[in-house]
Image (cartoon, rainbow, N blue to C red):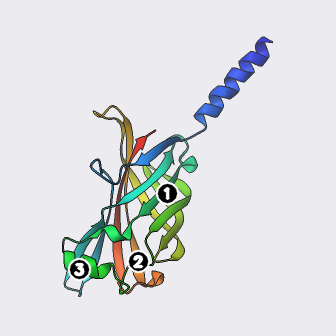
Amino acid sequence: MKNITFLAILLTASISTAFADDYVIDGTGAGMHSSISFKASHIGISSLWGRFNNITGNMSYDADNISASTIAVNIDPASIDTNHEARDTHLRTSDYLNVEEQPSASFTSTSVEDLGNGRVKINGTFNLHGITKDISFEAVRTGEGETPFGDYRVGFEGEMMLDTSEYGINGGMISLVLAIEGVRQ
């Protein structure tokens, strides 16, 4: 009986450590500590910077088993903000994002690879403008731990090039800059 009890305790302990912690992305509202920004060429002379103000999502993360990690992010394209209202209004039209017919964009990971030293490669599907494609990008863990807010958080940053023409948008190449902070649940 003692061996069965010990085995049950051992199995319970190993099962509980085999799961990644769940996090909610701190991305919308007063507590916003995550962002998805972009940089695009402006007529080959300078760079235009912008961001999406409304992002939500969740992730699972296990520093000891990176391959068990997942992330899902939802983006509200209508929340585009380039610090110029007339341009933002135009970017929301059918000339670009067409937010009336395409009210959301999303990324869902299919796998996460450990590259060492806090670096990961995230593979998944990206849906933009009603078109879904497989993409990959690298990210780095920027920090992790207890916060003064009484919770536990982890942060990642990454950057990737995106050809908007592959998604039916006449915008050319843009650089997406991701800064994601998750609050452990």
Residue occupying the far front of the picture? 100
Give the residue drawn at x 35%, y 53%.
Answer: 27
Instruction: In the rendered view, tell whether residue 7 sits above or below residue 89.
Output: above
Look at label 1 and name its amino acid.
Ala
Give the residue drawn at x 23%, y 76%.
Answer: 48
> Residue beneath label 2, please?
100
- The Cα atoms of the two marked residues, 1 and 3, are separated by 29 Å
> Residue beneath label 1, please?
72
Would you call the spot at circle 2 few (<14 residues within 10 Å), some (14-19), or many (20 or more)? few
Numbered disc 1: secondary structure: strand
Query: Of the residues tagged 1 and 2, which is closer to the observer?
Result: 2
Q: Where in the figure is residue 80, as x and y percent of width and height?
A: 30, 70
Q: Nearer the viewer, residue 98 or 58?
A: 98
Give the residue drawn at x 45%, y 64%.
Answer: 137
Asked whether the beta carbons under mark 1 and mark 3 sit within 8 Å of each other, the answer is no
Give the residue drawn at x 41%, y 77%.
Answer: 100
